[in-house]
Every structure is written in C-alpha cells, then in structure tokens.
Image (tube, rainbow, N blue to C red):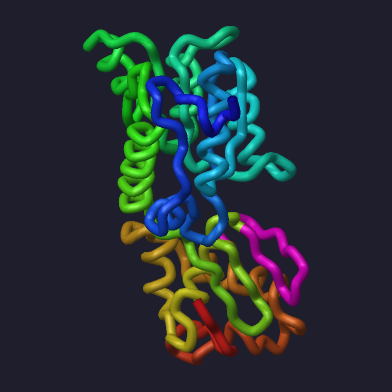
Amino acid sequence: MSPAERSVASGSGPSAPSGALAASSMTAVGGPTRILLVEDEENFRDPLAYGLRRDGFEVVEAEDGQRAVEIFEASRRPGGVGPIDLVLLDLMLPRLDGTGVCTRIRRSSSVPVIMLTAKDTELDKIVGLEIGADDYVTKPYSYRELLARLKAVLRRSRAAAPEPEPVLVAGGVRMDVERHEVRVDGEVVAMPLREFELLELFLRHPGRVLTRSQILERLWGPDYEGDTKTLDVHIKRLRGRIEVDASKPVLITTVRGLGYRLDGDSEH
C-alpha cells in the first residue's frame, strides 16, 4: 500500500491539489511554502509528508525535538534549508518534547506552529496554546482536516505579517533595510548605525531638502540640545563612504542656508 493510499490517521488520504490549495502552498514571493514536520512515529510522519509534498508544499522532516530545533535555527542562517513558514509539531517527542520545541522557537520567531498530539484533555490544549502554538490538532485526524486547518493558520499568519522592509536605491547606492546592508556600485560598504540611519532618511526622501533641525529631531530626538556640527561630521563621514569624490558630492548635496538633499535617480 502506497503512502497516498494510507490514511494519515483516520482513513482520508491526500487528494490532488485544487487551484485554491495550490495557491495556499506558495509563499508571497512565489516559492513553495516550507513546512517543518516534527514527528517521531513513521506511520504518521511518512504519509503526512507524502501528502503535503504532493499538494505542493516543501517538507523538512525531523524525528525528534532536538533535531527540530537544530533545523529551525539553521534555517535562518546562510546555507540552511531556508526560512520555515509553518511548523507541524508532535507533542510527545524524544530528546525534547513538543512544548520545549515550541518554547525554543517562540524565543526568536512568530512562525505559525500547529501541535499534533494524541492527548485530548482541555488542559493539554490550553498548555499548548499558552506556550505559543497557533492551533492544536488531536490524533486521530484526517489529512483533509489537518490540511484545512493548516491553510487557515497560514492565511491568518500572512494577513497579520508586516510588510517587508523595502530596498532603497539611488545613484548607485542600494540599501537593504531588513538585512541592514548597504552596497555602493555593487560593493558592500560597512557603516556605523548612525550613518546607516542618516542614509536611510535621505533615501526615503529623495529630492527633498531636509533641514538640520529636521534631521536632528528625527535621528537624535526632539530633546537633543547638542551642536549641529555633530550632524555635519556625520554627513562628511557618510559622503566619504558613498561618494566618488567626497570633496565634490553629487549624491548628498548641501543646500546653502537650509540643509541637505539627496540627488540622483531613486526608486523604492
């Protein structure tokens, strides 16, 4: 009997993906939704993984809690499996149980977590939800029921997710706000936080004159009582990092008597 013919738990094997389901198995940027499936029992894990893959999901499997944590943490680093979009997490696991795994995940991520367990008491469900699980599915369950709940959790998660920070571009300067990275003509340029914030402010307001007082209030706060020379020093250092010739700036230009302006073609 093939995995597709077996019941995940109660007789309903995976079916072919519908148009709506196919859409739900894709991330917002077009790649497949990546699910971390944490289950030590092969008779549950194998048919479930098979069905999810058949329905267009990418599935990463872990057979114990410690391995699940290792995979999840590595997924967020270069060379890992890539960002995890949802975790299907069995409660009773060797090495580290499901509550421990969920607690570890919640320390650094809001990724959706669905708990899978044979325990059906109200207290167990409450504990699972209180430690950060988004839903709680009791074994035995049908594949179709689990799939419907998985899709619902993904929809809620995507609806609540903040818009990704933009990539800001102007005159050969490219800033990835989310990654906190600046490139000038393709080369990564390291800069202190204050200069990064200053450059971001200009990139978000291209072509607009920003007065010294406006910049100081935005970056140093409304109660700043220092000298405007502090800003001039930061401008000089920033120009040294992004201008071809800092003595003849063409990107961040001085508007005499007013302040500074970002010139050059921009997009964001």
Indicate left or right for 158 with 191 as reference: left
The outermost residue toward the bottom is 256
**Above/below status of 98 relative to 194:** above
**Label tally:** 0
Would you identify the image quadrant in which residue 115 lies? Answer: top left
Residue at 51 percent across and 39 percent down: it is 52
Q: Position of residue 11 (x, y in %)?
A: 40, 24
Q: Is residue 78 left or right of residue 149?
A: right
Name the one closer to the observer, 43 or 238: 43
Could you say where residue 106 lies in the image, as x and y percent from the top left?
44, 28
Which residue lies at the image location 57% right of the left edge and 29% below the top edge? 3
The residue nearer to you, when weighing 165 against 145, is: 145
- Please identify the quadrant where the N terminus is shown: top right
Residue in the image at 34% along x and 23% along y:
137
Establish if 210 lies above or below 119. Answer: below
Residue 46, position as x, y percentages in the image: 58, 25
Q: Is residue 220 visible?
A: no
Q: Residue at x 69, y 75 (%)?
A: 242
**Magenta-drawn stretch contains 187:** yes
Residue 249 position by quadrant: bottom right
Q: Which residues are magenta?
A: 181-195
Residue 7 or residue 44, whichever sits in front: 7
